[in-house]
Image: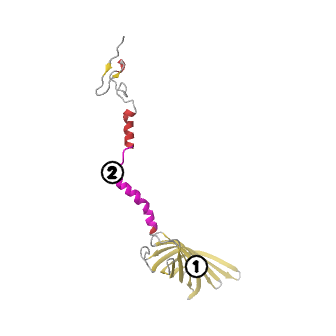
Amino acid sequence: MRIRPRVVWPNHTARQVTPGSAGVEPGHDSQGNCSDPDAAGGKGDDQMLRAPIPRRFAGPLLCALLVIPTVGVATAQERPGPAVELAAGWVGFADDGIVGEGLVGGAARMYLSSRIAVGPEVVYMDGSNHSHLIVTGNLTWDVLASIGRALRITPFVVVGGGLYQTRETFFSGPFTSSEGALTAGGGVRARASDRVTVGIDARIGWETHIRINGIVGVRIGR
């Protein structure tokens, strides 16, 4: 009868091993290399993944999660709502003196910040045997921000650039010409109600002219 030797491991229960594997710890090969994935640190990795976030990081992380979504909301609340305006007035051209014509137009403003707005403007001027059409993109700067204060009067500065088109009527037929347009000036707007404003606007522009007109605006949205 052949008796297999018994190897007693310290602090472990007795294990039976074959003669060729005496002294080899389970989960390792004969060279001492670990052959068991769990013994090689797999369980340790799982414990690291399940480890809770240190308390010193929990507070700042929670604050960041609560504050970041409100940044965009706060920024949007600082901008006035968009507005549309109608204009009517007088324009004068330098031509052996000042030649006056009437004008009507409309514009829109979309605020990028509490004071700066952009938007299109269309102005039509009617004269004797001719007419002018000005289409520009405008940049408006409100000198005083209306957010957080009950402003009755808001001064503003405006510049614009775009297209200036002239249509003239001759005996031979109509003639249309186009060139670049540039306007610059300013004015004031006064609140007539929570959404309605009235004001006056004065500008100079190219082709050389000066214009003075009244405006009525309506704020859209909030």
Q: Is residue 137 above or below residue 3?
A: below
Q: Nearer the viewer, mark 2 or mark 1?
A: 2
Q: Residue at x 58, y 87 (%)?
A: 99
- Tell me the crowding category of disc 1: few under 14, some 14 to 19, or many 20 or more residues within 10 angstroms, Cα based: some
Amino acid on which the number 2 mark rests in the picture: Arg
Near-viewer residue (181 or 112): 112
Q: Quadrant of residue 34?
A: top left
Q: At which x and y percent is residue 172?
A: 71, 81
Q: Earlier in the sequence, mark 2 or mark 1?
A: 2
Secondary structure under tag 1 reads strand
Amino acid on which the number 1 mark rests in the picture: Gly
In the rendered structure, the answer to whether residue 7 lies left or right of residue 37 reads: left
Q: Residue at x 58, y 79 (%)?
A: 105
In this view, which residue lies farthest toward the left? 10
Q: Is residue 72 above or below residue 132?
A: above
Q: Residue at x 64, y 82 (%)?
A: 130
In the rendered structure, the answer to whether residue 116 lies left or right of residue 59 reads: right
Q: At which x and y percent is residue 97?
A: 55, 89
Is residue 211 among what the camera can see?
A: no
Near-viewer residue (19 or 172): 19
Is residue 107 among what the camera can see?
A: yes
In this view, which residue lies farthest toward the bottom? 97
Mark 2 highlights which residue?
55
In the rendered structure, the answer to whether residue 167 lies left or right of residue 70 reads: right
Which residues fall within the magenta stretch? 50-76
Residue 166, magenta (yes or no)? no
Mark 1 highlights which residue?
105
- Tell me the crowding category of disc 2: few under 14, some 14 to 19, or many 20 or more residues within 10 angstroms, Cα based: few
Q: CA distance from mark 2 to mark 1?
A: 63 Å
Near-viewer residue (46 or 92): 46
Q: Determine contact: label 2, label 1, CB under 8 Å.
A: no
* Structure colour scheme: secondary structure
